[in-house]
Image (spheres, grey):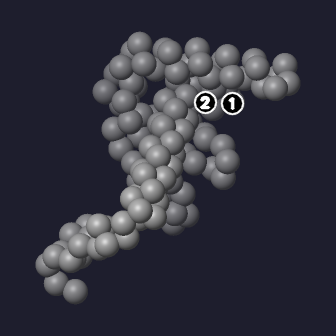
Amino acid sequence: MTQQQIEANATYQRALSRAKAQNLMIGAVGAFKTTGQKFYGVTSSANDTMYIVKVCGNTLACNCKAGMAGTMCKHRALVCNHIIEQSAKAKAQEAQLAEVMAEEPEAVAVPMMLRHDNTGPRLFR
Ligand SMILES: [Zn+2]
């Protein structure tokens, strides 16, 4: 890691610690209608508002004061941590599934009663 990366990581860790200490939460997840750009709504530590953290390619942008200035804010840190954790969890689940499938492929073949896909369960096709 370069010195710059070490410093950036330390800034991220400090921002994440603040987010956790102040009980910030991701209260909403969605995508903007026109661009399809994904966003997370993060609760504010000061009042009942939410800040919007947008996923912009490989980066995150936040509309709080610090975020607008381009610094690593606690909202971005929280979303960044969430994405890392979700990714790790998904990888672990896939690895476990792959292991089971490799050993007994029949065990994972169960009849489909309801259609479950990204749109949620449906009774009719
Ligand atoms: Zn922010």
Category of crowding for the residue at label 1, using alpha-carbon neighbours closer than 10 angstroms: few (below 14), some (14–19), many (at least 20): few
Q: In which quarter of the image is the N terminus?
A: top right
Q: Examine the rendering and report whether any part of residue 52 can be seen.
A: no
Category of crowding for the residue at label 2, using alpha-carbon neighbours closer than 10 angstroms: few (below 14), some (14–19), many (at least 20): some
Instruction: Using residue 106 as the reference point, say whether residue 32 is left or right of it.
Output: right
Please provide percent x and percent y for residue 62: 56, 36
Q: Residue at x 85, y 24 (%)?
A: 2
For label 1, the SS is: loop
Q: Residue at x 52, y 21 (%)?
A: 16
Please provide percent x and percent y for residue 19: 46, 20
Please provide percent x and percent y for residue 45: 39, 19
Instruction: Please name whichever residue, 47 or 87, is drawn nearer the observer in this view of the structure.
Output: 87
What residue is shown with label 1? 70
What residue is shown with label 2? 67
In the figure, residue 49 lies in which quadrant?
Answer: top left
Q: Is residue 86 above or below residue 117?
A: above
Amino acid on which the number 2 mark rests in the picture:
Gly
Which label is found at residue 35?
none
Q: Residue at x 52, y 63 (%)?
A: 36
